[in-house]
Image: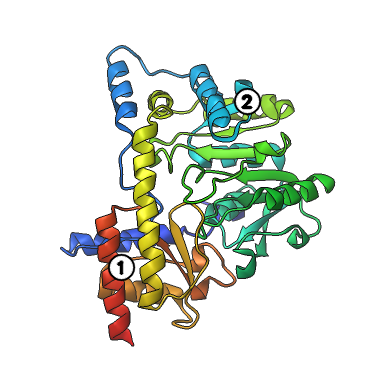
Amino acid sequence: MRFSSRGQVDPFIVMDVMEAARAAEAAGRRIIHMEVGQPSTPAPAGARAALAARLGAETMGYTVALGLPELRAGIAALYQRWYGVELDPGRVVVTAGSSGAFLLAFSALFDAGDRVALGAPGYPSYRQILRAMSVTPVDILTKPENRYQPVPSEIPADVQGLIVASPGNPSGTMLGRPELAALMAKAEARDIAFVSDEIYHGLHYEGRAVSALEISDRAYVINSFSKYFSMTGWRVGWMVVPEDHLRTIERLAQNMFICPPHASQIAALAALDCVDELEANRAVYAENRRMMLERLPKAGFTKIAPPDGAFYIYADVSDLTGDSRAFAAEILDQAGVAVTPGFDFDPARGHTTLRFSYARASADIAEGLARLADFMAKRG
């Protein structure tokens, strides 16, 4: 049977690393996971309890396409709490994870043949989802001196969209308000659709992240319960869209997804109130970040942009290897630490970069760092 050309997207390399790590564990080895951007903590206890209390009384049938009204209101209240932004709950769309939000956003904003700019290094699935929709991703080769974030002068000519992530994946760096506002102003002046990926908001260690909604309503803002709320496998996210785009998004959501998972929405609503537990998780990441920034350079990974948020360190390893995929395989084999080669995030330059995740428990991170130091000392 035939294949579509647009279906031939690149693999998500971190999933290949996860599989190699799983195989090593199945063979009896203890692997320290620094490859995957997934909290080691479960969904908040209050979220799990709320769902358990409802399971016996609810059929968990379809919800409306845009999500439970009470969850949309709760998310709108979060914007007031975090940013001081008064947000109409009607503009909030609950989605099947942030991936579902990207599918809806790209379907609403772009036609086949359009070109969409995105920073490299950046989350690889932007690129692959766009390609699967016959839209051309255009990489902006961001610079270390700009902390791997795009600047207005780098927005390519003849693009119909711009995707910005702050905190970024894999860099963890954030855009300040002036820098984000400048990018949004340039996009608006050129009639470029602006998509702000904010799924790591809440995970910051000094100044907080700035939401695009603090600057303008003319943006698509995408977020998720996966990271700060520690609910990756529950597959529930959201986006905020301009009011005049809402009906288009609703029609797409009705046909593409029917609705987000009902049970996950119930848990997500309760998770919004689990502040103490979530902040305790963030304190763990802050300690992990401290250890990473102190000990990675001592081990020999010296070229990094210190992250403002998320739970990643992105390292330039050009002084250590010209093949980051082989280097990551060597680290897994000899040190028992799984890390992600940079090809996922930057096809042009990722052969000399690695991403380290510090989303695990602090004891695991400390052990992983000790193993990396020993590996590097033996490697010379």
| 2 vs 1, front mark | 1
Answer above or below: position of 18 versus 50: below
Coordinates of residue 291 in the picture (x, y in percent): 35, 63
Q: Is residue 118 visible?
A: yes
Coordinates of residue 360 in the picture (x, y in percent): 32, 53
The residue carrying mark 1 is: 369
Quick one: label 2 or label 1, which is nearer the N terminus? Answer: 2
The residue sitting at the left extreme is 28
Image quadrant in which you'd find residue 365: bottom left
The residue carrying mark 2 is: 250
Q: Residue at x 53, y 39 (%)?
A: 223
Coordinates of residue 105 in the picture (x, y in percent): 63, 39
Identify residue type, mark 1: Leu
Q: Quadrant of the C terminus?
A: bottom left
Q: Is residue 161 left or right of residue 225?
A: right
The residue sitting at the right extreme is 189
Q: Residue at x 43, y 43 (%)?
A: 227
Q: Residue at x 28, y 84 (%)?
A: 378
Answer above or below: position of 175 versus 144: above
Identify residue type, mark 2: Glu
Is 139 or 111 nearer to us in this picture?
139
Q: Is residue 113 visible?
A: no
Q: Secondary structure at mark 1?
A: helix
Is 42 or 332 nearer to us in this picture?
42
The residue sitting at the top extreme is 57
Is 249 or 280 nearer to us in this picture?
280
User: How dense is the environment of label 1, judged by Cα within 10 Å: few (below 14), some, or many (20 and up)?
Assistant: many
Q: Is residue 211 left or right of residue 368?
A: right
Marks 2/1: CA distance? Answer: 47 Å
The residue sitting at the bottom extreme is 380
Image quadrant in which you'd find residue 147: bottom right
Coordinates of residue 295 in the picture (x, y in percent): 36, 70
